[in-house]
Image (cartoon, rainbow, N blue to C red):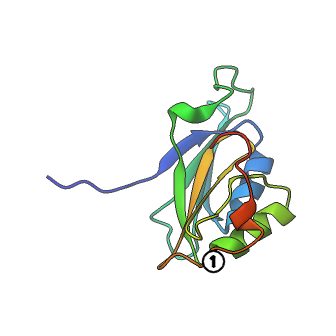
Amino acid sequence: MKIRYLHTMVRVKNLEETMRFFELLGLEKTRQMDSDEGRFSLIFMAPPGQPECPVELTHNWDGDDGLPSDSRHFGHLAYEVENIYDMCQHLMDNGVTINRPPRDGHMAFVRSPDNISVELLQAGERLEPAEPWASMENIGHW
């Protein structure tokens, strides 16, 4: 029996803010479907060269009062990055809170505008601990 990964779907309240967040991570829009009848949009975003690994952003045009305020039931999305320190600095420079800094040179967590937890993992070997990351405390929960 075969199985193939398709995508991970998350509901979003503010499509523009959320797309900007994923663009800061380096993802790009691979396709979009708008349903006038269903009053929703589906935006698929994936790392460059990896269209088979998308996150599907589902945006209900009339809002989504049923969306939990804390999406912890979902877990998290995980992305490998070339340099975790550079990525975290880039995100911080663009107003993203680093909830779990990469103190170990290997792992960090951030949250999207819709409170979706995103794990960032260093590609290859972990980097040597470095400041300011080694001394940073956790902010909120991840």
Mark 1 is surrounded, within 10 Å at the Cα level, by few (under 14), some (14 to 19) or many (20 or more) other residues, namely some
Viewer-nearest residue: 11 or 97? 97
Q: Is residue 4 left or right of residue 31?
A: left
Number of marks: 1
Q: Residue at x 64, y 26 (%)?
A: 67
The kind of residue tagged 1 is: Asn
Residue 87 image position (x, y, % from top left): 70, 70
The C terminus, quarter of image: top right
> What residue is pinned by disc 1?
83
Q: Residue at image x 48%, y 79%? A: 125
Q: Residue furthest left?
A: 1
| Residue ID at (19%, 55%) | 2
Q: Position of residue 75 (x, y in %)?
A: 51, 41
* Residue 103 x, y percent position in the rendering: 64, 64
| Residue situated in front as seen by the camera: 70 or 67 | 70
The picture quadrant where one finds residue 63 is: top right
19 relative position to 8: left or right? right
Which quadrant of the view contains residue 81? Answer: bottom right
**Figure check: 90 above or below 113:** below
Work out whether 26 lies above or below 19: below
**Residue 120, image x and y in percent?**
58, 62
Indicate left or right for 65 with 11 as reference.
Answer: right
Toward the front, the furthest residue is 135
Badge 1 element: loop
Q: Nearer the viewer, residue 17 or 140?
A: 140
- Residue at x 75%, y 72% (from the top left corner): 131
In the displayed structure image, the side of residue 15 where residue 32 appears, left or right: left
Q: Is 73 drawn above or below residue 141 in the view shown?
A: above
